Image: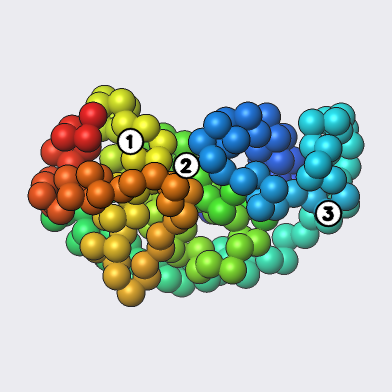
Amino acid sequence: MSKLKIIYNKEYDIQRVLNTIKKIPWFIENKYNYKNFIFPKKLDKEKLNDYSEQEIKDAVISEYSDDLYKENEKFLVNNWEKIFKEIESAFLKSNLLPQEEYRIYLTKYGTGGSYDFPNTVIVNTSFSINILKNIIHEITHLAIEENVVKYKIGQAQKERIVDLFFVKNFPRRALVQNVYMSMNTDKIDQTFDDNFPNMENVIKKLS
């Protein structure tokens, strides 16, 4: 079973907010509405680029508390063995490999979740969605990332592939996004259906 290392602190929350603000042009380009993301209450979402780094730090520190993170840490530790068995079973079907350890950063800012290759998952505890769903979603991203880069798959395609994999393997935990709903996903969906469970073939055929 993969090990789980759970991390949270005010320094990471500060960095999360700073990084999210820096990525606003990328979010706009990829049709994400960053105004739906979570920022410190003291920051006006209409003026995020106008704040100094110190003002952002002060805003995060003013509302930081370990309490919610501790609750989520306990929840993850208690449920990890069960959820990992589901992940491992799904990955085996598609020749995907889990990492030996996952570093899970808990935050209450930014997007609902994100990842850093090879083994880092960031989960936003502020969203109502069960954090286990987000963790499965981001771990799936990590598992296919090498092929995504190799075959130069675009952002919307990548998200759709992960969603299809999620629905296929974890139907009772189904998590589907709407970031790509303005695009026609028929080709992606058909390619997935024709090539699953071989995820590399799915990605290769969409390159």
| Label 2: which secondary element | strand
How packed mark 3 is, by other alpha carbons closer than 10 Å (few <14, some 14-19, many 20 or more), is: few
Placement of 89 over or under 14, stated as above or below? below
Q: Position of residue 36 (x, y in %)?
A: 66, 52
**Residue located at (31% from left, 26% from top):** 152
Mark 1 — residue?
A: 145
**Residue located at (46% from left, 72% from top):** 78
Real-space Cα distance between discs 3 and 2?
A: 25 Å
> Is residue 37 something one can see in this rendering?
yes
Q: Quadrant of the N terminus?
A: bottom left
Q: In terms of sequence position, does the residue under pointer 1 or pointer 2 come before the other?
A: 2
Query: In the drawing, does residue 20 fall left or right of residue 78?
Result: right
How packed mark 2 is, by other alpha carbons closer than 10 Å (few <14, some 14-19, many 20 or more), is: many
Query: In the drawing, does residue 31 fall left or right of residue 90?
Result: right
Mark 2 — residue?
A: 115
Three-letter code for the amino acid on which mark 2 is drawn: Tyr
Real-space Cα distance between discs 1 and 2?
A: 10 Å
Q: Check residue 41 in the rendering and tell me which mark sits there, or answer none.
A: 3
Of residues 101 and 195, the one drawn nearer to the viewer in this rendering: 195
Of residues 205 and 72, the one drawn nearer to the viewer in this rendering: 205
**Residue located at (86% from left, 33% from top):** 51
Three-letter code for the amino acid on which mark 3 is drawn: Lys
Q: Quadrant of residue 79?
A: bottom left
Q: In terms of sequence position, does the residue under pointer 1 or pointer 3 come before the other?
A: 3
Query: In the drawing, does residue 207 fall left or right of residue 128?
Result: left
Q: Position of residue 83 (x, y in %)?
A: 35, 66
For the residues bearing labels 3 and 2, Cβ distance under 8 angstroms: no
Give the total of numbered labels. Answer: 3
Q: Check residue 51 in the rendering and tell me which mark sits there, or answer none.
A: none
For the residues bearing labels 1 and 2, Cβ distance under 8 angstroms: yes
Q: Position of residue 105 (x, y in %)?
A: 56, 49
Query: In the drawing, does residue 62 fall left or right of residue 157?
Result: right
